[in-house]
Amino acid sequence: MRGLEKGRKLKTSTISFLIFAALFFVCLLTACSSLIQAKRFDNDEFWESGHKILFGGDFSYGDTYKEGKETNEKYGYDYSFTKVAPFLNLADYSIVNLETPITDVDIEPYKKLKTWVHRGEPAVYSQYMKKYSINAVSLANNHARDCGVEGLSETIMILDSNLISHVGAGSNDDEAAAPLIKDIIIGKDRIKLAVFAAYEDRYKKNSTESSSIFAAVDQPGVNLLAPEKIAKRIKEFRDTNPNGFVVVFPHWGSNYAWKSRSQTDLAEKLIAAGADIVMGHGAHLIQEIEKYKDKWIIYSLGNFVFNSPGRYEQKDAWPYSAIMLLRFSFENNKLKANFRLYPIITDNLVTNYQTHPVDEKDFNKIIELLMEKSAGSKALLSSMVKGRDKLGFYLEGIVLQ
């Protein structure tokens, strides 16, 4: 009888402990989740005023992929933009990374030079970039010269003739290094935005491609990601625009992978050079988010609309990218800048070639993994807001208060 009573007490004690542990765990989760606060749907000042710039990752209709070509022929060129069009429609200005030359140059000779060679039809890209309000593109990437100097020159000519701005490539190194300058006018106030685009020198480690794609004094090409040169350019910009805002928009990192040590070193040098925010692309997925010296680094936005079959499953990589909306406003004659980062699904084998915003389950999974991977995750959590608006789920951060 005593043994039975002792067993009951032990059982009761165990149950009490489990209940206490469960309650403690719930409280812990609640405390952690409160660091990222949800915003209300109504009275959202983000949309009520200010000037919003959209930054997107890699863009290509995937014309040289069998699957991309078949998708375009079957559904038309509007199809892949259907679910990201609302972002473009609500932005005041949009910049993406154009991950293909747009040219009539014969692609066949260039297929022998590298594994992946891209080319897009000039008439198609000019029509649909204008239709979906893509106002500017970065050309600082590893595909800008897939069709040689002639292909790059034709791309620039077509962009210019369609009043689509470009940055990160040119007929020489001076042109390639020049930033994209945009006047942002909000009521009676105005600022100048400078966007610097550059491509990391991967060729030191990859001998299958030639470093000749980089611009030189007498050679057309893309802008090399050299922090000391960008620092000089930023200083020149700030000398005449002391209140200007600087974005560095690099193409870097390995495909389907988290950030590298090289990216971290470069990002910190770019912040030291005077960047207000660094947001990259090139990995085909969203990478870590960090703060360095109180400045934001979004290592990779991943893809925007990029119609390749992808290698997410093969590389065991998560299929998420992001669209950035950077909002500028003035309060008491002082510039304020904040951003919303909207995760999107960009594995075309999952989306059937329609990039779209994530659902709540995927959003929570993304937050969990980003917090695990990103440096200073606790501080990151406390300085960001989790929310949902008419475009989808987002993470919000303040760049300038």
Image (spheres, rainbow, N blue to C red):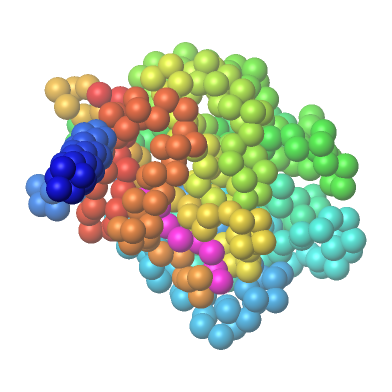
Q: Which residue appears at 44% of the width and 41% of the height?
A: 370
Q: Nearer the viewer, residue 38 or 77?
A: 38
Q: In this view, does 352 lie to the left or right of 23?
A: right
Residue 53 horizontal/vertical position (percent): 37, 44
Q: In this view, does 125 lie to the left or right of 388?
A: right
Q: Residue 31 appears in which quarter of the rendering?
A: top left
In the picture as drawn, the residue positioned furthest to the front comes out as 1
Q: Which of 150 and 273 is in front in this view?
A: 273
Q: Which residue appears at 16% of the width and 43% of the height?
A: 2
Residue 203 horizontal/vertical position (percent): 81, 38
Q: What stretch is highlighted in magenta?
A: 342-349
Q: Which residue appears at 49% of the width and 36% of the height?
A: 373
Q: Can residue 226 be seen in this view?
A: yes
Q: Nearer the viewer, residue 359 or 249?
A: 359
In the picture as drawn, the residue positioned furthest to the bottom comes out as 74
Instruction: Assess whether residue 64 is covered by the magenta stretch.
Output: no
Residue 46 horizontal/vertical position (percent): 21, 43
Total residue callouts: 0
Q: Residue 107 appears in which quarter of the rendering?
A: bottom right
Q: Residue 269 appears in which quarter of the rendering?
A: top right
